[in-house]
Image: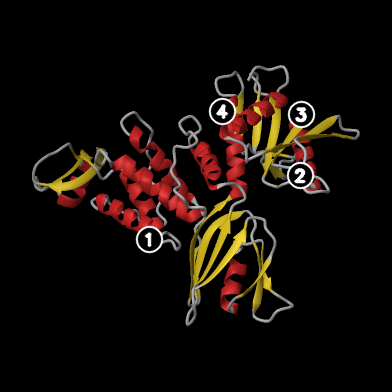
Amino acid sequence: MTVVQLAEYGPAVSVALPDAAGRTLAASRILDTAAPDPYRSGHWRLRAGSKVGAVSLAVPGGDPVVVRITPKVPIARLFFLIGYSLDPRGWRDGEVEVGDHDELLPALAHAVERQVDRALRQGLLQGYRAAEDTALVVRGRIREAEQIRRRFGAALPVEIAYDEFTTDIAENRILRAAVERLLRLPGVPGDVRRRLLHQRVRLADVTPLVRGQELPVWHATRLNARYHHALHLAHAVLGGSSPEHTAGELRMDGFLFNTNKLFEDFVTVALREVFRGTDRTCRLQDPHHLDEAGEIRMKPDFVLYGPEGAPQAVADAKYKAEKAGGFPDGDLYQMLAYCTALGLPDGHLVYAKGNAPHAAHRVRHASIVIHQHALDLDRAPADLLGEIRSLAWQMTPGATV
């Protein structure tokens, strides 16, 4: 087995790979760079971007190739960002066990198994599920239209619909789907895999989800409170970028998180939580148009509206570390367009880390100031959320948040 170890946004490395494997990586766009090395025959230059996790390529007639991409932030902090984005009011740092694993996939598998075990410790949750059946006795209500269409007026059997009290409910189906997804992935440690197999046995009577099928809907209630953390992690597993395709006889499978999207979700959700309970309205991925004809679309990550419905602040999250030459100019132009279209005098770009905590640029002849903020993701969760609150205050000076 060939194992390629890369770091998120790290330097490119030259790796000996079969041409088929290299071409598949290049076509998948998992990496920022995947191209033949012009200086070394049979080698490919690989560089990771914002996607972290692991993928495996089964090479016909050769050893499998595993590409592992480690995130810049510690695994425990990454799980806090994921959990907070999914459940900001119920998630707390330290509630998810990642064991001694320092790689994303083993830690994720360990965390999901521990949370599923905790959820099922009191037995499988039961609930009511709408069911339809053909029976000799009436239970629930008769489906009159189906009775006429199928039975042509015959009294028996009866087409019925009823609510069934069962363990085959959305919550359990989602947990089973997440467990089975992890069992298919490469790189899950043997001891974790054995525990996941045990959880699948506990969920054996639950109907499995069909691959590609939309996840069933569940709602957080007091009755399913012990399932909440397990379900949020299960959604992270099932919603993660999961390359599964075949190029000729070459199969690629894996699990990846996009840290760009993760950072964007965390920042916007955390800002929304700061303004919860105030007289302001927050909209995420808010669609607008730059031109009067409505032909040039734009979608800021976060727009804050005042009590009267007018925009008060706009922010965009960018998972990019500041370089020696400063923040990327393209981000400034994008924010300038947002401010102009929304009629705002200030715009806010939020980066992950950086050389300076804050910078401001006053645009000539426009009376617009573009602020650039940098969040330190290495800080403790409470401190990180404090930075978000400080950012919210800067976006709305003089307001109480």
Q: Amino acid at mark 4?
A: Glu
Whole-percent x, y for residue 352 in the image: 68, 42
Badge 1 element: helix
Asked whether 288 or 175 is in front, the reply is 175
Q: Do the residues under discs 1 and 3 have CB atoms within 8 angstroms? A: no
Q: Residue at x 79, y 38 (%)?
A: 336
User: Which disc is residue 190 wearing?
Assistant: 1
| Sequence-first disc among 2 and 4 | 4
**Residue type, numbered disc 3:** Leu
Disc assigned to residue 344: 3
Of the residues tagged 4 and 1, which is closer to the observer?
Answer: 1
Q: Earlier in the sequence, mark 3 or mark 4?
A: 4
- Kindly identify which residue carries mark 4: 273
Amino acid of disc 2: Asp
Question: Which residue lies under the disc numbered 2?
Answer: 331
- Calculate the distance from the C-alpha at mark 4 to the C-alpha at mark 1: 40 Å
The x, y position of residue 4, in whole percent, is 57, 67
